[in-house]
Image (cartoon, rainbow, N blue to C red):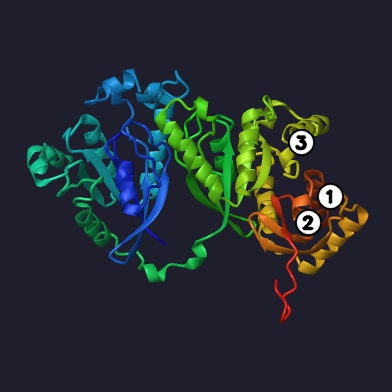
Amino acid sequence: MRPLIAIVGRPNVGKSTLFNRLIGGRIALVEDVPGVTRDRHYGDGDWAGRALSFIDTGGFVPEGMAAASEPGRASDRQQPRGGGVGGGMPSVLEDQALLASMRAQAQLAIDEAAAIVLVCDATEGLVPSDEEVGRLLRRSGKPLFVVANKVDSDRREAELPISELYRLGIEQVYPISAEHGRGVAELLDDVVAALPEAPRLAEEDPAEEGGIRLAVVGRPNVGKSTLLNALLGSERFIASPVPGTTHDPIDERLLHKGHAFVLTDTAGIRRRKSIAARIEGYAVLRAIQALEKSDVAALLVDPTELAVDQDAHIAGIALEKGRALVLVVNKWDLIEGDAEKEKKAKELLRDRLDFVSWAPVVFASALTRAHTGRILDLAIRLHEQATTRLPTSKLNAWLQDAQSSQPAPLWRGLPVKFFYAAQVGTRPVTIVVQANRPQAVTDSYRRYLMNRLRETFELEVPVRLVFKQKTGDRRPGRRG
């Protein structure tokens, strides 16, 4: 198992930039605004042939210490860059409850880590919150590496107050530039040396990889992070009534009934005109990318605002990407729903989201965890459907039965006939049908064939029908 290295420090010192460099990619969002990272964020990397995992954390500000009192923070606190999400939402550092959640998440990362990297801003030297965090980390008894970030050159190293960081009671300070990679190799050499249990890359168990990727998507503040915590049975993700709490898509592994899952929390997806802050625009793009990478998407909708335009927009993205979809009516405990209410709500969903009427619906409560396990059960079923290979013989039996029951409309007085069907792809299930006049297949007849296909094979996942010209006779001596 890979040892975990926690990257901690106060806000806006470059933790996410260092995290991205250590894992060799851009998973964590990076922006020159305090508080961009809120949750723990995991990523794998390696060094000197050793397999490592890194944890990026939100800004760690010790309880009772105001981040705004630190150098360069007052202006951020008074007017966050971008005017705040949604034009008026307070900054992260002003929201004390959210700040406490970020601190708790960082503490959880410290507790599970094998080693800790404390990132400080070399341009500011040692500030009071660095000293307090240093004391907390030394008490953990785990290997501690203090990094002075933003040291881009030897000249800068000589000019900056790096020596102040030795007051943290450590033997060595690592002057680095996370952005440019300066000094990172020396840091990793010592981290690996302090972790003799780090496995070699060739020794990793391949069974740990893979799993059904389930992305939880929806509008802001519909309970996505709360649902993920309910599925995991722990407070893994920050849940806050403040819209826009989640920025990065966050992955977490889970085993359910013998099936491995990779659960992904995503930022709330708004329409482009509603995205005021630049960082939220990045977050929404990452959410859409996470949806594209997923096997199944769980779309959370609010029962008090059922299937609004933005829900339809997100469902449309899932359909466009060909991803299996579960419609989750969350916060059902607020409605105290009975069978009749559920029936009416389901009919309303089917009516407003008729283009994904095949998607199963779950009424659940992330807060009470009622029926949340059913979401995972459905994800298993949908993943099996989306990756299945339908027998060609049964596909052609479906095609002939459908054609016999209701022939295609004539085209310019000429018949439209279908000869052969075969599956050519999965995720989404893609069926190619050979026809004599593929251009003449009407939308209504396409829908008829699709409905018969879903009925025959009991499919609740996206399906694409592609009509192609019948292959010509290719016997020797004849042209195709």
Observer able to see residue 140: no
Q: Quadrant of the N terminus?
A: bottom left
Q: Earlier in the sequence, mark 3 or mark 2?
A: 3
**What residue is pinned by disc 3?**
350
Residue 411 is tagged as 1
Q: What residue is at 34 percent from the left and 29 percent from the top?
A: 63
Q: Amino acid at mark 2?
A: Arg
Q: What residue is at 50 percent from the left and 49 percent from the top?
A: 252
Of residue 396 and residue 133, the one placed in the foreground of this image is 396
Q: Amino acid at mark 3?
A: Arg
x and y percentages locating residue 39 in the rendered image? 43, 39
Q: Are marks 2 and 1 in contact (CB under 8 Å)?
A: yes
Residue 437 is tagged as 2
x and y percentages locating residue 238 in the rendered image? 48, 35
Of residue 13 and residue 306, the one placed in the foreground of this image is 306
Q: CA distance from mark 3 to mark 1?
A: 32 Å
Quick check: 320 left or right of 23?
right
Q: Nearer the viewer, mark 3 or mark 2?
A: 2
Q: Quadrant of the C terminus?
A: bottom right
